[in-house]
Amino acid sequence: MISLGRPFSRLASVLALLLAFAPLCMAASAFDIGLDGKSPYPEHSRDQILELERNSDGRMLHRDELDAFKAVLVEQGWPTYRTSGPALIDAAGKLLERSGLDFEFQKYMLRVLDQQVGDDIRPAIYARLADRIHASHDSSQLYGTLQQRLDDVSTVDPPVASLGSLLFFRDFYGLPSLEDELASGGIDYEATLSQPPATYTRPDIRTLLGELIQPDQSLRTALSAARSKGDSAKVELLQEEIAASDREGLRRIKQVFEDVGFPTRDMVGIDGVSTAFLLVQHADEDPAFQKRALELAAPLMTSRGMSRRQYAMLADRVSLAAGEPQRYGTQMTLQNGKYVLQPTSDIEGLDRRRLQMALGPYQAMLDSANAERP
């Protein structure tokens, strides 16, 4: 498989946030395609992609054309701006939309592209591509980019499959809320899929965050698997390893915060901010540090430099650590074999507060979490 060629995957950095709001998930072994890594496309592969795009001219790919497109991606990976340039990204994006004979392939490739969204892939155009693909197969969309205007009123059509997915994506990438977009527009969906890649003022911190998140997530994934198998000995061992990993991660992330405060998008990128948040979220051994990080995160959240959802999760963590009820209902606990909310203030107004923080209804969150239990 082609190397992903990035310090860390955005999918890994937001794994704990997605819960049930990940409609693109499927078995990673279905296809063997990544990103093009550090090597540009050879000329014959580049020409093949561009020729397929020209010859298909807006129609769906025939089976032999689709097979040829897949073969190039398996061999070379998805093109990236740094190695293969914008024209190839845009051509491949058009071919992906025309690959309707294989919906599973399209969904898999959307997951691959997700790793580049906000870097060399425009978030809004990625969302429109995903919505067009899903609407062509199951008469629903993910992010609300497909709209109709009748009698000067804009409506979403077809319907959105998951409010949680829509809120998460738009909040995470700093896009307008659906309500604001319907009222006033503001997104140019005619722009290209590609964009100049992001640059970072602190690539050293970005690299460090990538190093810290790998054991954080891999150990927790292994723990979840051990619990589902009922392997108590493995669970105990992994819990000890996670505790040790969290202590080391806490030591190193605290040094980052002492040096620069809460890392910003300019410093480390969208996924870097998300990773910093996740490491702070797991720093339960030091609630004073979590509280300080929350204070530093407030201006980032206000300026859309940090996801409101992430801020809400950290705020709830800090409240519970202080012995106070959480405000946004993001923290759950197992009770009699089912997930329930940890102590939460003003349940009647909870969903209203959650919506303000780009969170879906709390009951849907609980239902989804319980449905995932073995």
Image: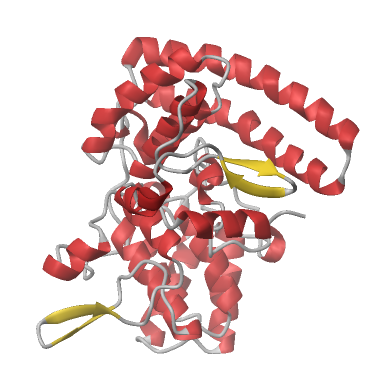
Q: Position of residue 155 (x, y in %)?
A: 24, 79
Q: Residue shown at 47%/20% (left/top)?
A: 322
Q: Position of residue 85 (x, y in %)?
A: 35, 55
Q: Position of residue 118 (x, y in %)?
A: 34, 49
Query: Quarter of the image holding residue 216?
Result: top right
Q: Quadrant of the C terminus?
A: bottom right
Rendered view: 342 above or below 126: above
The reply, left or right, for residue 104 in relation to residue 304 is: right
Residue 188 appears in the rendering: no
- In the depicted view, which residue is nearer to us: 198 or 22? 22
Q: Residue shown at 60%/47% (left/top)?
A: 340
Query: Quarter of the image holding residue 266?
Result: top left
Rendered view: 350 above or below 361: above
The reply, left or right, for residue 301 in relation to residue 371 is: left
The reply, left or right, for residue 134 in relation to residue 201 is: right
Residue 336 appears in the rendering: yes
Rendered view: 267 above or below 337: above
Q: Position of residue 225 (x, y in %)?
A: 78, 45
